[in-house]
Image (cartoon, rainbow, N blue to C red):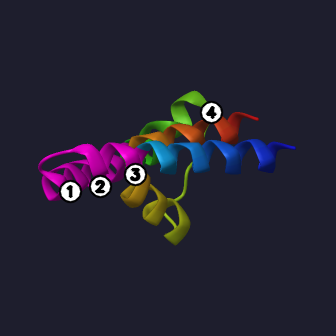
Amino acid sequence: MEKIIFWSLCGTALLAMTIYYATRLKRLKTVLYGAVTGIVSLMLVNYFGSGFGTDLPLNIFNVSGSVILGVPFVICMVIFNFL
């Protein structure tokens, strides 16, 4: 059940980010900003996550998800980690 919730949240975030990036005038700048903030948020959760009971390793799935989807992916992973 948790996997269904996780994948539906990731799909919704992907759809929202695609619509957001498509409607922006400066698409490349927006995509780069989203990727950088996603990586920074993943690194912050990886470094400080043990303080509040979550652990997100820096593997290929988490890094690529945070680059493509940005901060919403990291938030979904933290929520999924608590389930």
Mark 1 nearby-residue class (10 Å; few <14, some 14–19, many ≥20): some
Q: CA distance from mark 4 to mark 1?
A: 30 Å
**Residue at (37, 59) in percent of width and height:** 67
Dot 3 falls on a residue whose secondary structure is helix
Q: CA distance from mark 3 to mark 4?
A: 31 Å
Per the image, the residue denoted by label 2 is 35
Numbered range of the magenta stretch: 17-41
**Residue at (48, 59) in percent of width and height:** 65
Amino acid bearing label 3: Thr
Name the residue furthest bottom: 60
Per the image, the residue denoted by label 3 is 18
Amino acid bearing label 4: Gly
Mark 3 nearby-residue class (10 Å; few <14, some 14–19, many ≥20): some
Dot 4 falls on a residue whose secondary structure is loop
Amino acid bearing label 2: Ala
Dot 2 falls on a residue whose secondary structure is helix
Q: Are marks 4 and 1 in contact (CB under 8 Å)?
A: no
Magenta: main secondary structure equals helix
Q: CA distance from mark 1 to mark 2?
A: 5 Å
From what the image shows, is residue 45 above or below residue 61? above
**Residue at (12, 50) in percent of width and height:** 26
User: Which x, y percent locates residue 77?
Assistant: 59, 45
Mark 4 vs 2, N-terminal side: 2
**Residue at (51, 37) in percent of width and height:** 75
Q: Residue 40 versus residue 66: which sits nearer the camera?
A: 66
Of tags 3 and 4, the one toward the viewer is 3
Residue 32 tag number: 1
Mark 3 vs 4, N-terminal side: 3
Q: Is residue 74 visible?
A: yes
Per the image, the residue denoted by label 4 is 53
Mark 4 vs 1, N-terminal side: 1
